[in-house]
């Protein structure tokens, strides 16, 4: 463990940088970066790249055809060989379309800063920038090369960035994820549910609903029976849920429905439950004679189980205590790129980003005075070995 004076020094320095931190996050928020709009996303990427180059970091821009470019930023100031690598993982894309600033402009009120994407997660990216700067200014004796990976498609599933995330994770001794914390106390996310989507398709047989209903096989009726089955798999006590969120079927009121389909949202807190649900999905068999079933999809992010984060959280809690701060933990129902790194077998700590509320809503905001402590905590974790 490094000198215990460092966490306190980091916090002391960063408390004097609040105006600069706020100005930096404002600039990022004003650079709208929707996941599905490459041109504005790339403009935000330009700003991020310049900010990190100004700090002397090595910035590699990874071009993307359809999404915003990705940034792989590295820092290792010494001539000696590093003992390993730490990965700091974040994304700069947001769920807000271009023009959202007109309805929800950047503003500061009552110790909070508001704006699209400020909580999820442009304040987290800002905190990482100032964490690196503080490490540089104090000449803290790093043991690990630092890699900061900023992606552009987390909000839409990370299809373009998944490979590089998993590759960098496997090179790393630990991963620190800058997703927002939970609640006003800034709880760290030490567990996340695995997330998936499955499509249940029923093939029946069309017939006239009045003249020959007995000759048809009603796909909607079959689907209803199947959904009753899968609803019984939900177990809130174990963190398992299966929800039918989209249903489609039939063509006309006087025609026995030949096709029906449902989109299922899948959640599980344990890998064992995730695998069990997938087995049961693919083992479904028709109830109505002559009906035929298809099941597509499944889980695309495995759970982040606490065993992947427990040791890192204990270290973070100790470092926070050295700064005179308390640090709590929680379980999150949604997934993040931290699920991917944990599934790769790498120790992962999530929820290290901003403290605030209202992600993906018109009330999205951060607590301004929490930024120095979160930045200092990240710097202290990157210094630890």
Image (cartoon, grey):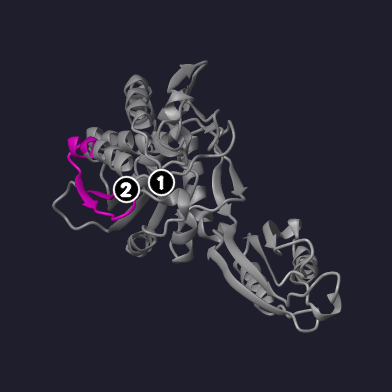
Image quadrant assignment for residue 310: bottom right
- Disc 1: which residue: 35
Q: Are marks 2 and 1 in contact (CB under 8 Å)?
A: yes
Image quadrant assignment for residue 158: bottom left
Disc 2: CA contacts within 10 A as few (<14), some (14-19) or many (>=20): many
Q: Answer above or below: position of 284 versus 53.
A: below
x and y, in percent, of residue 71 in the image:
27, 49
Q: Can the viewer see residue 331 in this picture?
A: yes
Q: Answer above or below: position of 322 versus 112.
A: below
Q: In this view, does 42 lie to the left or right of 356?
A: left
Give the residue displayed 35% in from the left and 53% down from the top.
Answer: 87
Give the residue displayed 78% in from the left and 69% down from the top.
Answer: 229
Along the line of sight, the residue nearer the viewer: 204 or 185? 204
**3D distance between C-alphas at marks 2 and 1:** 7 Å
Q: Can the viewer see residue 385 in this picture?
A: no
Give the residue displayed 25% in from the left and 34% down from the top.
Answer: 138
x and y, in percent, of residue 337 in the image:
45, 54
Give the residue displayed 27% in from the left and 38% down from the top.
Answer: 43
Mark 2 or mark 1, which has the lower sequence index? 1
- Disc 2: which residue: 68
Along the line of sight, the residue nearer the viewer: 310 or 270? 270
Q: Is 58 in the magenta?
A: yes
Along the line of sight, the residue nearer the viewer: 95 or 246? 246
Most extreme residue toward the top is: 110
Q: Is mark 2 on a helix, strand or loop?
A: loop
Along the line of sight, the residue nearer the viewer: 354 or 195? 195
Q: What element carries label 1?
A: loop
x and y, in percent, of residue 122 in the image:
40, 36
Q: How many labels does the image show?
A: 2
Most extreme residue toward the left is: 79
Q: What range of the chain is rendered magenta?
A: 50-75
Tell me, for residue 162, which label it has, or none: none
């Amino acid at each position: 463990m490094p000198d215990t004076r460092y966490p306190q020094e980091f916090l002391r320095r960063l408390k004097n940088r609040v105006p600069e931190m706020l100005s930096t996050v404002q600039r990022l928020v004003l650079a709208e970066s929707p996941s599905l709009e490459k041109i504005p996303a790339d403009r935000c990427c330009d700003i991020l790249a310049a900010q990190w180059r100004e700090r002397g970091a090595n910035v590699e821009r990874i071009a993307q055809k359809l999404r915003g470019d990705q940034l792989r930023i590295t820092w290792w100031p010494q001539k000696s060989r590093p003992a390993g690598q730490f990965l700091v993982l974040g994304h700069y894309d947001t769920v807000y379309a271009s023009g959202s600033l007109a309805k929800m402009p950047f503003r500061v009120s009552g110790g909070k800063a508001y704006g699209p994407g400020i909580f999820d997660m442009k304040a987290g990216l800002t905190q990482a920038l100032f964490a690196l700067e503080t490490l540089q200014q104090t000449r803290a004796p790093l043991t690990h090369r630092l890699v900061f990976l900023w992606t552009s498609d987390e909000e839409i599933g990370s299809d373009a960035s998944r490979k590089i995330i998993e590759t960098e994770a496997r090179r790393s001794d630990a991963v620190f994820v800058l997703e927002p914390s939970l609640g006003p106390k800034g709880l760290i996310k030490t567990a996340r549910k695995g997330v998936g989507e499955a499509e249940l398709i029923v093939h029946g047989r069309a017939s006239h609903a009045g003249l020959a209903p007995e000759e048809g096989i009603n796909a909607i009726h079959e689907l209803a029976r199947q959904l009753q089955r899968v609803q019984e798999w939900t177990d809130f006590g174990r963190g398992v849920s299966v929800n039918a969120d989209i249903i489609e079927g039939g063509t006309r009121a006087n025609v026995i429905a030949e096709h029906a389909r449902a989109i299922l949202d899948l959640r599980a807190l344990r890998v064992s439950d995730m695998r069990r649900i997938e087995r049961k999905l693919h083992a479904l068999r028709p109830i109505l004679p002559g009906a035929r079933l298809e099941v597509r999809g499944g889980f695309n992010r495995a759970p982040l189980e606490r065993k992947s984060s427990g040791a890192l959280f204990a270290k973070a809690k100790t470092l926070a205590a050295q700064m005179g701060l308390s640090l709590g933990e929680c379980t999150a129902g949604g997934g993040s790129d931290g699920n991917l790194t944990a599934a790769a077998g790498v120790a992962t700590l999530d929820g290290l980003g901003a403290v605030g509320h209202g992600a993906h809503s018109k009330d999205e905001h951060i607590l301004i005075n929490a930024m120095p402590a979160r930045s200092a905590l990240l710097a202290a974790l990157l210094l630890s070995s």
